[in-house]
Image: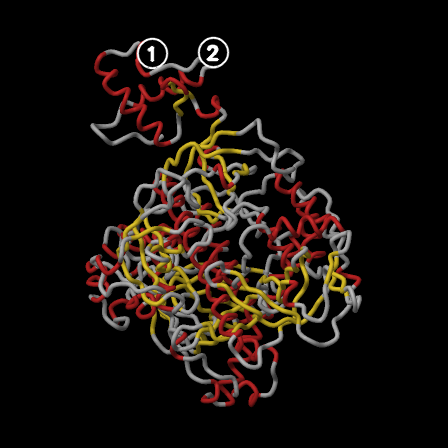
Amino acid sequence: MNTFENSGPPSASLEDRFLELLRRKNYTPLRAEELAAALKLDRREEKKLRPLIHHLLNQGFIAKVKQDRFVIPRDADMQSGHVKFRQSGVALFFPDGPDGVPSAAPWHIPAEDTGTALHGDRVLVRENKSARPWRKAAAGQAEKLGRVIKVLERAHDSVTGTLRRDQQFWNVAPDDPRIVRTILVADPAQGTVFPPPQPGDKVLVRLAEWTQRHLNPTGEIIENLGRTHTPSAEFKAILHKYKLHPEFPEPVVTEAAAFPPEVRQRDYQGREDIRGLFTLTIDPDDAKDFDDALSLERLPGGDLRIGIHIADVSAYVKPGTALDREARARGNSTYLVGCVVPMLPHALSNGLCSLVEAKDRLTKSVFVTFAANGKIRSSHFANTVICSRKRLTYRQAYALLKEEDLAVIRALPLPPAFATGSTGRALAGLTDGELIELRETVRTFWSIAEPMRRARMQKGSLDFDFPEVKIFTDAEGYADRLELIQNDESHQLVEEFMLLANEVVARRLFEAGLPFLSRVHDQPDPEKLVELRDLLATFGVQAGDLTLREEVVRVLGKIKHHPQGHTLKTQFLRSLKQACYRASVDGHYGLFKKFYTHFTSPIRRYSDLVVHRIFDDLLARTGATPNPGATIRYNQAELDSLGKHLSMTERNSTEAERETVKLKLLEFFEREAKRTPRQAFPALITDIRNHGFFVELRQSQAYGFVPLSSLEDDLYNISNDGRELVGRRTKRKLTLGQEIQVEVYRVDRFKRQIDFRVIGGKKSAPDQSSEITPAMVNQNRKMHQGPRKQKHSGQQQRRRRR
């Protein structure tokens, strides 16, 4: 438990005795002086009691009731936790659980009972037992109602939003629609921000203390971010919200600048020189850095040796340096649409460490030898130096796998230079011999990876692969086009070898008795799986005991071809625990592996850099490195603390990445609404209301709403079972589960909502396979409550987080 800081922390024994007293079953609420007497405090301890009480009150560990008496919050029907708002003003309260893990059963807080809380705040809430239950929760229990009693800690001390002037008042509409109050500010012309913000500018506002609910919160403009909804202003707002910093402190920049632009000859000492091996990289079109490469060797007797080569960041980033401290604080790179906030300065992340084409690079290598039947014969590790022969994009690799005509392969364009860290040479410039060698190498890789993947799935690894909706930006940063990228063989090829390297390294470190950071994915809570089974049943997917892996695999296979498979997979993922970093070998539920670590992305994950340092210790013990005294060792406590920190920074980056995707989807559809003619989008009707219906776009997997007011051919009424809208005159039906064609109708960037309208043409009848039961109506409505969210999943994110 934290200790307070003012006038020195109280002794832990006093804090423990104090809380132990309040937790007794026979305890009755006491005042401060009565508590001092009950605890039999001496004069020295008595002086520490009031600061201790003040600290525990602020942290929510105790609560004050009538006549200034103190209790444990639960004894006064109160609970500390975090509150999350919806655009309507109502909120969900997530009580603190063991070790700060939120409870699985949130409470409902009506808008009028949210007090002065804002979205994300840590608050103290009293249960309202006298009020009528809000609704039945998934497990059949009535959802608890609560009232915010006190704000314990603000989630943010500043927010971004758009400056407006209403009559004589200046105010800022927060970017986050879940902050439902506008913030009053002074006339910006009288402030110190230059240039003075104008109405319609995006600004950063420092919040003042807000204590009276009947008044709007106030704040002070401290920065002008630019014209709202421009790429630059939106980017800056994301940076502020998630505390991301593209720029590096001066000491970090200085250290990075001291490195030479290229690998030096003396850096090869003690390393295996494998620059002669046929080595290549396979990455997305817009990859900014390249930290993994593959090589192929054909051995006597028909065996194949695959080299998995990972950028050796540890050769440059040493513990205790400014570079290391900054990388550790950031935890990982953050990949926003069209740009990246790197963990390491550009000179390293895109330069000296990046495995770009035709450049010598230092690497750590895992060599795995496969027999002709695909079985693994052996593996060994080494510090190496490589030279990538070719930088391939996924689409180039896929063409090499599938296409026989070299002319078709040559015609593939390079990615735009502004979107990537390296384009590589154009395939059109390669000779027939070079292309054939490249094609045969990629196909040989797949001949090994494909049976590995099949065996992994047969053993019980879960297939949660989504098609990726890739948002491409133009040179000015505006969302320009969407592309649905399937998780095809080119992606799977790379993924299988990265998974293999992570597993082989983890197992070897464990066998050597070296503490290391595992990538852990815990078993899901059985209660969550029961809720998931009930939800699946409403969509016509019958599931048995989901605590059995074979049943999970069976159900995932079934929903893969369900008309709302993407939605159901998303719900499936939400029922599982988040993967995290931990200094213990606790297994990976999703991959169904006992030993697993992150080793393959040290340019963008600090966890991998740490594992590389431990990897060097392993090499030293086996005599594979000439300088064992220079290795870095971590103890269990250090790794435990580091794992918690890195799990936190990863979650922060994930949230930032999701938000930038939502913003860019809104930007794309807003621009689409201004085009003539407008594009038609295939969509699925997912929920029907009295005033319209929700749709999910097939290609982009974005959600939107079709208001009844946009249907001009007839007046429509909702059917008694809530499953369809029926035209009064034409008897035309719009049915739950039906696929239709829509176009953008309007976009509200402030509310983050997209409205569509149905366009002409014969509408398809509902497919029998997409038959939706009445029970699905209620489930769909629950899933659509609150802000209309945009969905996104990414292959690059999957590779980074597994």
Residue 211 is left or right of residue 405, and the answer is left
| Element assignment for label 1 | helix
Residue 247 against residue 142 in the figure, above or below: below
Q: Is residue 312 visible?
A: no
In this image, 216 relative to 760: left or right? left
Residue 26: mark in rendering = 2
Q: Amino acid at mark 1?
A: Glu
- Within the image, what quadrant is residue 754 found in? bottom right
The answer to the question of whether label 1 and label 2 lie on touching residues, with beta carbons closer than 8 A, is no
Disc number lying in front (1 or 2): 1
Q: Is residue 480 or residue 733 the one in the foreground?
A: 733
- How far from the left and from the top, in percent, is residue 298? 52, 73
- Which residue is denoted by mark 1 in the rendering? 34
Report how far apart the C-alphas of labels 1 and 2 lie in the structure. Answer: 15 Å
Residue 377's spot in the image, x, y percent? 55, 60
Q: Please tell me which residue lies in front, 244 or 523.
A: 244
Helix, strand or loop for disc 2: loop
Residue name at image x 45 percent, y 79 percent: 415
Type of residue at label 2? Asn
Looking at the rendered structure, which numbered label has been put on residue 307?
none
Direction front: furthest residue: 167
Residue 257 appearing in the image: yes
